[in-house]
Image (cartoon, grey):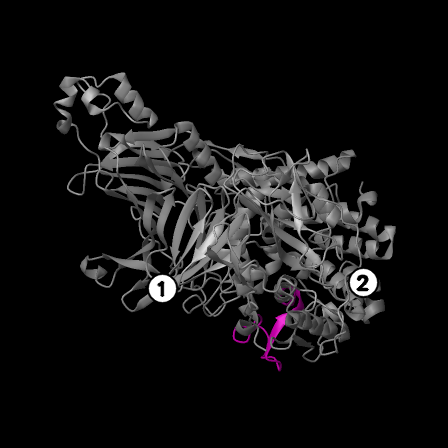
Amino acid sequence: MEDSAEPAAEPSHEATDQRGSRVSRRLVLRTTAATAAAVPFANMLAAPGAAAEEPQPPAPAEAGPATVRWLGGTPGSSIGTSFGVPWPKGAFTAGTQFTAADPAGAAVPLDTWPLAHWPDGSLKWTGHAVGANSGLTEQLIITAGRPVAPSRRVTVNESTAWLEVNTGVIRARIMKTGPNLIQALSRGDKQLAKQGRLVLQMEDRSNADNGTIKTVEYAGTITQASVEHLGDSRAVILVKGTYNKGSRKVLPFTVRLYFYTGAESLRLVHYFIFDGDHQTDFIKGLGLTWQVPMVDEVHNRHVRFVGTEGGIWGEAVRVMSGLRRDAGSAVTSAQFNGVATPPVSAWPANVRAELDDVPIWNDYKLVQASPDAFHVAKRTGAHSTWLLHAGHGKRAAGLGYVGGVSGGVAFGLKDFWQRFPTQLDIRDASTDTANATIWFWSPDAPAMDLRHYDNKRHGLNLMYEEPGRGIDDICATPEGVARSHEVTLWALAATPTRARLVELAKEVREPARLVATPDYLYERRVFGKWGRIDRSTAVRTTLENSLDASIAFYQRQVDQRHWYGFWHFGDVMHSYDGSRHTWKYDQGGFAWQNGELNIDMFLWYQFLRSGRADVFAMAEAMTLHMAEADSYHAGPFAGLGSRHNVVHWGDGAKEARVSASVLKRVYYYLSADERVGDYMRNMLQVGQTLLSVEPLRQILPPPTAPTRVRIGPDWTAVASNWLVEWERTGDTRYRDLLLRGMQDIGAMQYGFFSGPASAVGFDPATGALTSEGNEFRDGYNLMLLFGGDQFLYELVELLDVPAFKEHLVKYALYVNGTATERVALYGRNFSPGTFNQFYSRMLAWVGEERGDNTLKQRAWTGMNPNSGNMPPVQTVSGTTVLTPVEYVPGIFTNDVGQRGLTVIQLMGLAREQAP
């Protein structure tokens, strides 16, 4: 079997909407594959190949209602949202319906679909959706039951050429092939946008030596479009394609369009995979463009941009204020507010007679060239100069509007200034058809340069950079990395008020989102072992305050150090240079963190405990960054990620630990984000890739097995990919791969200590692990430091392989054990080469398993709660630095992430023993 998977056949049937139209009713996400999972999940604990017993219904389980709340507080409005909810094992069978109600008991329409199943086939996670402006109360209660239907459900009509979605307010026609993504966007009987297309500009530098650089246009071309999900409250359209120029096809893309019942908007999530040549392919512009019919008089046409802190730049295409002859407050006030002016015949005669002398402004743009500066420019046409001083500010909200008093389109790009260079464009506003573009990469900026920072090797000893096979070959390649963007389009019946524009901008910047409460998540024991926030003693309060201080410091560092940009946003730096008072942005493996030692997981577990919106936002940005810029979705390293480096993909070490699904599943299950589901499925390619990119190929002789992996962190990472695919789809191939590896480790004499650097032979096709002579060199194993501990805690509860669990217990005991203990068990002493303070948390797990409070106390002692807290933050200014900044002497992001995870885990496993 190859280590790849295609989704199972998609259950579908024809249904009829309220008007009698035929619609395609695909009620299950492609990415979750089989909805009726009871049969594939039957008899999960049988050995691979064993005869399956007749499936039995899951045993009843205690399942109280789930409580979800709006992240950051109840919003004033919502375009609709999706979210995930966990359930206890055996509580609900596949196909169970769920209903939502507000605190007063009023029912709220709710869509439901499965996200994951327990081994017995019962529901582990369910995805849900509520429509626009639905459920806007303090919290919602989710229980089993028949959901109430919305007043009008979202519908999809389908032909051989297109799909048309109706939210009850707007209609959008999506083409199945060709250059037009959104053929038409209408509200009522009025078409407000058409010919929405994805566009790419590339620089042709083939004649650059002669001073000629040309811009070449590529057209985003759709190859397929389908209904991925259709419920009463939400429809999702899945689109795939490539950017084409003649016979060349580059940057394969995926687009999902989200429609919620009652919404006057649609949400679009686009991501592309870079498959070009980074030495020659320089992206000059990348974006989404569409046309807006302009039917109002030019003085009743409006352009709006939302700037900093709710400020609005807003003008009419023909500005009537400030003239030498006063047009009157009735005219100027109407223009300012975006409502219809009095008829021209009612204007003052001296203004009316000279109206043609007032210029008409045709083109507008807002360019966010850096995280600290944007400017607005306008011009009368291509024949004229841009007025670059029309407006300026620091950080634009990324929202614009073009249209007239009789309607138009508002449009927004999430993380607009954080992912600079970005741009909002409006052209031809004075003609019958304006063109609007959201630029993910601004064409006004220098072209995107994906080359490495040097053309020679730098070593581990001084620069902490893994050369791999050398950066002068394919190792420092971005081929296969990805990046996503989130766009919202509103089809509006009139120019929105300035206050409404600010509300729309907030929805782009901070989408209204429902999440399960910390109490409910803790009751369900999701994602392994963690404890609630506890400030019941002075020491515990100090520990909790230190966790909060660590996160606050990094939040401020992101801003002070400007860790922003198209590829950078979401990441933080690895190590600090106290002489230059800068993070080591230019020093090999000391630069971008790339998730090393799980600062990302620290953020997620702190969110699970706190429910804080700011922590969620930081964790979300980091997860998306790691899943996109740090991971390979195609190419020679497909399924692997890149170790920390000056350039995100620059390090020679390509590691499964960076790209592992265990790092993405928290966000996926909380948000039900299909894009992240794609990313996790893409990582299933890693087994095939490891056949040619063996992790220890430079330091060990070739294995006798097809390839080699370290049990930690390689096998734990690969196995986490299998676990997620198994629980999402019920495909027993992945269960069998897990079982085979667990059985093989269980059969090894030294278990997790087997092999040099815990390296063993690996066959991706079968999941088999071999001891390669069962060498015992040093007992080195890094499984804990990349999410392996939490993954293994879950795994041993899902699959019963006693010998595997026994070896895990031994590892947890003796990785921090004494020399005497190791000699007694293994016949020799050795250095595990691990971080004892952090591995101490595994002692607490054994203590919980055995009911041994002594081990739990030992775990706290090993971590030493009285040391290692976040040191005081200092400030440096003056001639020492370019601008005043904060710093912490000797700060090391690895330690911050791991200490945070250790405290959080001990608070759950050994709370009573906490000082």
- The residue nearer to you, when weighing 24 against 883, is 24
Q: Which residue is mark 2?
A: 819
User: Which residue is labeled 1 in the image?
Assistant: 250
Identify the residue at horizontal 19%, vertical 57% (top origin): 211
Rendered location of residue 665, percent (x, y): 61, 55
Query: Which quarter of the rendered picture does the N terminus lie within?
Result: bottom right
Verify whether residue 715 appears in magenta. yes
Q: Identify residue type, mark 2.
A: Ala
In this rendering, the answer to whether 308 lies above or below 517 is above
Residue at disc 2, secondary structure: helix
- State which quadrant residue 389 falls in: top left
The stretch of residues the image draws in magenta is 691-716
Picture coordinates of residue 600, whole percent (x, y): 59, 50
Find out whether the residues at labels 1 and 2 contact each other: C-beta distance under 8 Å: no
Where residue 724 sits: x, y (%)? 63, 62
Q: Looking at the magenta stretch, what is its main secondary structure?
A: loop
Label 1 to label 2, Cα distance in Å? Answer: 57 Å
Q: Position of residue 851 (x, y in %)?
A: 87, 54
First in sequence: mark 1 vs mark 2: 1
Local crowd size for mark 1, using a 10 Å CA cut-off: few (<14), some (14–19), many (≥20) = many
Q: Judge from the rendering whether residue 872 lies leftward or rightward of residue 652; answer left or right.
A: right
Residue located at (62% from left, 82% from top):
704
